[in-house]
């Protein structure tokens, strides 16, 4: 399990991925966001995963919550594709 002060954005290279938090919450999909200071474990159908970290002090207040909201909405697949292409 990992726990850092950064916002983590996980993107599956192929297939899907899963994130399990210490508080029992679980999520699966091709793109998952984890808030800062949440102990979690990430696993993937593929042997590796893309992980983008964003330090909260580098963005304005509320920006990470808004980003997580957008990433979990209808734009999720488009964001995942753009990140993979990058």
Image: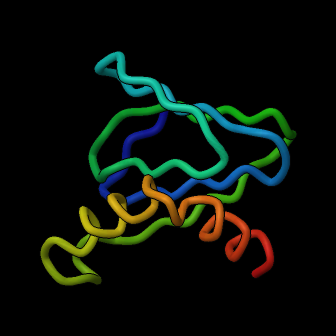
Mark count: 0
Residue 25 position, x and y percent, is 36, 23
85 vs 70, nearest the viewer: 70
48 vs 63, nearest the viewer: 63
| Residue 63 occupies quadrant | bottom left
Which quadrant of the figure contains the C terminus? bottom right
Q: Residue at the top extreme?
A: 24
Above or below, 58 against 15 in this view is below
Q: Is residue 59 left or right of residue 53?
A: left
Above or below, 8 against 30 in this view is below
Residue beneath the point at 85% across and 39% down: 46
Q: Residue at the left extreme?
A: 61
Above or below, 9 against 38 in this view is below
Residue beneath the point at 26% across and 82% down: 59
Residue beneath the point at 55% across and 60% down: 76
Q: Is residue 76 left or right of residue 84?
A: left
Above or below, 8 against 46 in this view is below
Residue 16 position, x and y percent, is 73, 38
Residue 44 position, x and y percent, is 74, 35
Residue beneath the point at 73% across and 68% down: 81
Q: Is residue 37 left or right of residue 39?
A: left
- Which colour style is shown? rainbow
Residue 58 position, x and y percent, is 28, 83
Q: Residue at the front extreme?
A: 74
| Residue 55 occupies quadrant | bottom left
């Amino acid at each position: 399990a990992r726990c850092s002060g950064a916002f983590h954005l996980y993107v599956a290279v192929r297939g899907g991925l899963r994130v399990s938090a210490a508080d029992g919450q679980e999520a699966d999909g091709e793109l998952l966001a984890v808030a800062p200071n949440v102990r979690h474990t990430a696993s993937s159908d593929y042997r590796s995963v893309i992980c983008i970290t964003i330090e909260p002090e580098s963005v304005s207040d509320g920006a990470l919550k808004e980003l997580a909201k957008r990433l979990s909405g209808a734009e999720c697949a488009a964001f995942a594709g753009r990140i993979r292409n990058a």
